[in-house]
Image (cartoon, rainbow, N blue to C red):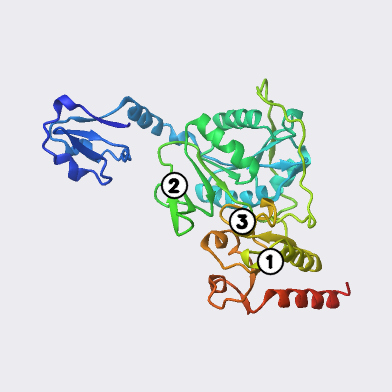
Amino acid sequence: MPVIVQVEKCSGCETCLDSCPFDAIEFKDGKAYINEYCNACMSCLAGCPEGAIIETEKSVQRSAFSNQLKDYKDVMVFAEQKDGKVVSVSYELLGVGRRLSDELGANLLAALFGAGEPEAQELIRWGADKVLLCSDSALEQFNDDPYSEVLAKIINEYKPSIVLAGATPVGRSFIPRVAARLRTGLTADCTSLEIDKETKNLLQVRPAFGGNIMATILCPDYRPQMATVRPRVMKKGEYHADRTGEIININIGNAVSRTRVLDFIKEVSGVSVNLHEADIIVAGGRGIGGEKGYKMLEELAEALGGAVGASRAAVDEGWIPYSHQVGQTGKTVNPKVYFACGISGAVQHLVGMQSSDIIIAINKNPEAPIFNVATYGIVGDMFEIIPLLTRKIREVKNL
């Protein structure tokens, strides 16, 4: 607890109650106590006429760290790779990272593990000023332990003010470990990142309470400020083929790992297009009725050259694997065209697809919330509409 009450000095006057905006002070047996709601705003220190409320040593240490904040300047992006190729979300992070670093007048750094110089050069062309490249073979395949240790060492050495990573299975697995090592905060699944004009702190915006509100989170007293961003939420930056930058080779030394990766098993499905990369997604919800209904959606997706998505309700029913789930607890997608078939439009699902360029909703209920966000809406029986649509598309494409 950053604030404590010296009970022997407390007179029980209750003056301090009005000074706390978080209801973090309570009285027991005529003496004040600080509860778990304390936000360390320190308003109560001046509110006690007896001087009984004081900062703890931990709080003083935090204040001492605040004096070192000026040493943290740049913006760093963790550039995730798979099979030696940088994944798309890394370029999206470079887009927002470039904007943030320009506002701060700082450099944009990219940390790349397990890839080669050609991929590092691509990161520079997409906006990075410097690429911290660690091409050691031990990092070619993702492993929590060495990734956490190496990234923490790089952050301690280069002292970026902001660190961004993708909210992918890789990012969600090891970025919290890095934040814990550095004893700093982490905001997950951000949908917007801005710089506060006055304090220059990072404003980290993410959905909360089932997507019913948007929370803005700050980390003013510790560095770096860390956030993960879902794929396809941010737009890629500008690509310049002639852009130049610096590639710094990093030696990992004796990175310790308690585990060893034996193999990665790839899921094989009828439609192999990755949802994050798909320009067209045909998604079904509870109204699709079952696995037979999803076969119908797969035929439409195949005709369109797209991928099949699903709502959480359909995944929970076991009709389709979790890897197809779109929404707050699934993937966030941003295709050119999104078909919502038999999906009512719960807030949790909308969070994952409402930024699509065109949304086409097919539902027999004209009052379904999905029509509020749809570009085009079709009210009717999807078991008649979808086969007809598939047949017409095949005729036009001569399939």
Q: Nearer the viewer, mark 3 or mark 1?
A: 3
Marks 2 and 1, the one that precedes in the sequence:
2
Q: Are marks 3 and 2 in contact (CB under 8 Å)?
A: no
Q: Which residue is mark 1?
A: 336
Residue 200's label in the rendered image is: 2
Say left or right for 26 vs 167: left
At label 2, the amino acid type is Lys
Say what secondary structure mark 2 lies in: loop
The quadrant of the picture occupied by the N terminus is top left
Q: Which residue is mark 3?
A: 332
Marks 3 and 2, the one that precedes in the sequence:
2
| Mark 3, other Cα within 10 Å: few <14 / some 14–19 / many ≥20 | many
Say left or right for 240 vs 228: right
Q: Picture coordinates of residue 33 (x, y %)? A: 22, 33
The quadrant of the picture occupied by the C terminus is bottom right
At label 1, the amino acid type is Lys
Residue 129 appears anywhere in the view: no
The one of 287 and 176 positioned closer to us in this rendering: 287
Say left or right for 341 vs 273: left
